[in-house]
């Protein structure tokens, strides 16, 4: 093979990887600003969970505390979102669905989501806002 062709084959994936890294960084910063603006403060008990794919799933919480009585992300014209709140329930798309059990408590504090079991912290992480996928709107209709 010609050296220029080999060089091009090696450089293209590096450039694409760098572009992807920059885009993901921008998306995460945008998500953080959105979450800080919305300032979600809620606590709820898991009453249902569904596996979607790749460790991501949806949970339904009976809310015990919330600063939102209703929240529909469609009203914000967002294509990417992680929850909907309606009728004292929160419908959340969440990572690590396999570690969540019915009866667990989930607390959302602005940009953080925490999982508690028997009042003990199991895990805490930044809120996951998934890329748009066709199932997301159907999940919230259940």
Image (tube, grey):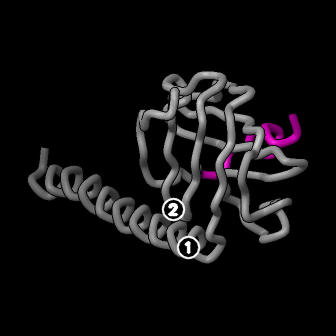
Whether residue 18 appears in magenta in the rendering, the answer is no
Q: Is residue 60 left or right of residue 4?
A: right
Tell which of 26 and 110 is nearer to you: 110
- Residue at 54% x, 66% y is 31
Q: Quadrant of residue 102?
A: top right
Whether residue 132 appears in magenta in the rendering, the answer is yes
The residue tagged 1 is: 36
Q: Quadrant of residue 58?
A: top right
Judging from the image, what secondary structure is the residue with disc 2 in? loop
Q: Is residue 84 left or right of residue 120?
A: right
The numbered dot on residue 112 is: none
Q: Residues within 10 Å of mark 1 (few under 14, many from 20)?
A: few
Q: Residues within 10 Å of mark 2 (few under 14, many from 20)?
A: many
In contact (CB < 8 Å): disc 1 and disc 2? yes
The residue tagged 2 is: 111
Q: Position of residue 108 (x, y in %)?
A: 58, 53
- Residue at 49% x, 56% y is 112
Q: Is residue 110 left or right of residue 84?
A: left
Q: Quadrant of residue 8?
A: bottom left
Q: Position of residue 55 (x, y in %)?
A: 51, 29
Tell which of 7 and 117 is nearer to you: 117
Tell which of 89 and 94 is nearer to you: 89
Q: Which residues are magenta?
A: 131-142
Q: Report the Cα–Cα distance between label 1 and label 2.
A: 7 Å
The vertical placement of 132 against 47, above or below, is below
Q: Residue furthest front?
A: 119
The vertical placement of 140 against 127, above or below, is above
Q: Position of residue 66 (x, y in %)?
A: 73, 57
Q: Position of residue 42 (x, y in %)?
A: 66, 54
Q: How many marks?
A: 2
Mark nearer the N terminus (1 vs 2): 1
Q: Quadrant of the N terminus?
A: top left
């Amino acid at each position: 093979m010609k050296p220029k062709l080999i060089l091009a084959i090696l450089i293209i994936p590096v450039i694409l990887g760098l572009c992807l890294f920059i885009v993901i960084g921008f998306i995460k910063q945008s998500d953080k600003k959105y979450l800080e603006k919305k300032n979600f403060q809620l606590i709820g008990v898991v009453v249902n969970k569904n596996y979607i794919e790749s460790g991501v799933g949806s949970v339904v919480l009976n809310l015990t505390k919330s600063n939102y009585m209703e929240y529909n992300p469609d009203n914000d014209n967002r294509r990417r979102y992680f929850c909907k709140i309606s009728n004292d329930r929160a419908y959340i798309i969440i990572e690590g669905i396999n570690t969540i059990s019915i009866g667990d408590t989930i607390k959302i504090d602005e940009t953080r989501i925490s999982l508690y079991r028997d009042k003990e912290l199991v895990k805490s992480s930044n809120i996951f806002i998934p890329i748009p996928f066709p199932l997301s709107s159907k999940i919230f209709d259940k």
